[in-house]
Amino acid sequence: MRELLVVYCKGFSMGAADVVPGVSGATIALIVGIYDRLIRAITALDPRELQPALRIHEADGRAALVDALERMDVPFLIALGLGVVSAIVVLSRLMHGAVTTYPVPTYGFFFGLIAASAIVLYMEIPVWSPRRVAIGIAGAAVAFLITGATATAASHGPLMIFVAGAVAICAMVLPGVSGAFFLLVLGQYEYLTGALSEFVDGALAVVNGGSVTPVIESGTTVGVFCTGAVLGLFTMAHLVSRALDRYRGATLVFLVSLMVGALRLPVVEIVGNLGETAGGSLEAAVVTGTVGCAAVLVVNRYTEDLEYTTE
């Protein structure tokens, strides 16, 4: 139990990082010493191993199921996942309030985080070939176009929410890239943090005798997102992990270039809200952007000697 409690706390720190665009939960996993174990546990997940659950009424079936769960390190993933979810639930309300009430300084902070993260990760690429330059340009262009579209008319339909969940879960295996960053690119960050806050508020209201309608409405969105995340864990996370193993340089170039292209979104949000909201000055955006940049550089300074491996 003590070990699982420690894992829960580490998961909470990962979740707290992933709520903020530009801060990677994978980086926190590395710092607290569980990155390798996390990757091994994720890639070891296999639904076929749960067949003993069909014989759970038998003693040998229960024993086989427990053995399978321990072999896939499921208790570790559950404790870690609970920590991550707890942090997201607690901090999403704070972040939703920040992006809606103080968009200029908040998006300025996001700009600093993302820009500094991109610089740090570009420095991890030892060799730049014409092919990698082309991949980088393509990645930046893709993110630039996507964020341009989502900044003006982002869809919040079930399919988009499902895709957002599947993509965001990949941040668990991506050093330097956060799940919140992907949500920002897809134009779902503000919407989903708001939906989660509404769901939590609605659930608490139901306990006190309130209506269940708000819970159903926001809970549907949260459920679709979580379904996408679960399926993404068995598909996209594996694909990204393999890409990093086989084509690490090219994959990293593409992913970091996505961050560069996505800088369009915070710029649009800052310019569009100048003078319109609290703290809506360019000076405020510059200050918070500097703080965000400094935060990433400080973290990098204390993690630059650590290596991301899956061995």
Image (cartoon, grey):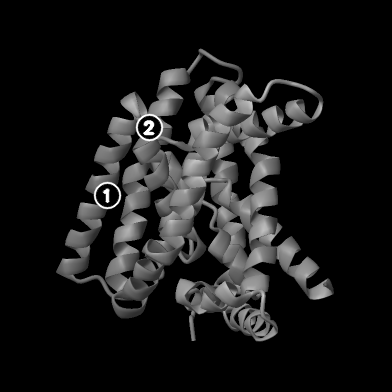
> What is the spatial separation of the Cα atoms under label 1 and label 2, in whole angstroms?
26 Å
Q: Which percent across, then down, holds residue 270?
A: 45, 26
Q: Residue at x 66, y 25 (%)?
A: 212
In which image quadrant can residue 5 be found?
Answer: bottom right
Q: Residue at x 59, y 24 (%)?
A: 102
Are circles 1 and 2 on residues that touch, CB within 8 Å? no
Q: The residue tagged with tag 1: helix, strand or loop?
A: helix
Q: Which mark is residue 157?
A: 2
Of the numbered discs 1 and 2, the one sitting upstream in the chain is: 1
- In the rendered image, the residue lying farthest to the top is 276
Q: Kindly report which numbered mark, 1 or 2, lies closer to the viewer in this rendering.
A: 2
Instruction: Mark 2: give few (<14), some (14-19) or many (20+) Cα within 10 Å.
Output: few
Nearer to me, 301 or 256: 256
Residue 101 visible? The answer is yes
Kind of residue at badge 2: Gly
Residue 108 visible? The answer is no
Q: Which percent across, then down, holds residue 166?
A: 41, 53
The image quadrant where one finds the N terminus is bottom right
Q: The residue tagged with tag 2: helix, strand or loop?
A: loop
Horizontal side, residue 57 vs residue 165: left or right: right
Nearer to me, 141 or 246: 246
Q: Residue at x 54, y 40 (%)?
A: 222
Q: Which mark is residue 17?
A: none
Kind of residue at badge 1: Ala
Q: Which percent across, then down, holds residue 133?
A: 20, 62
In which image quadrant can residue 185 be found?
Answer: top left
- In the rendered image, the residue lying farthest to the right is 2
Nearer to me, 56 or 164: 56
Residue bearing mark 1: 140
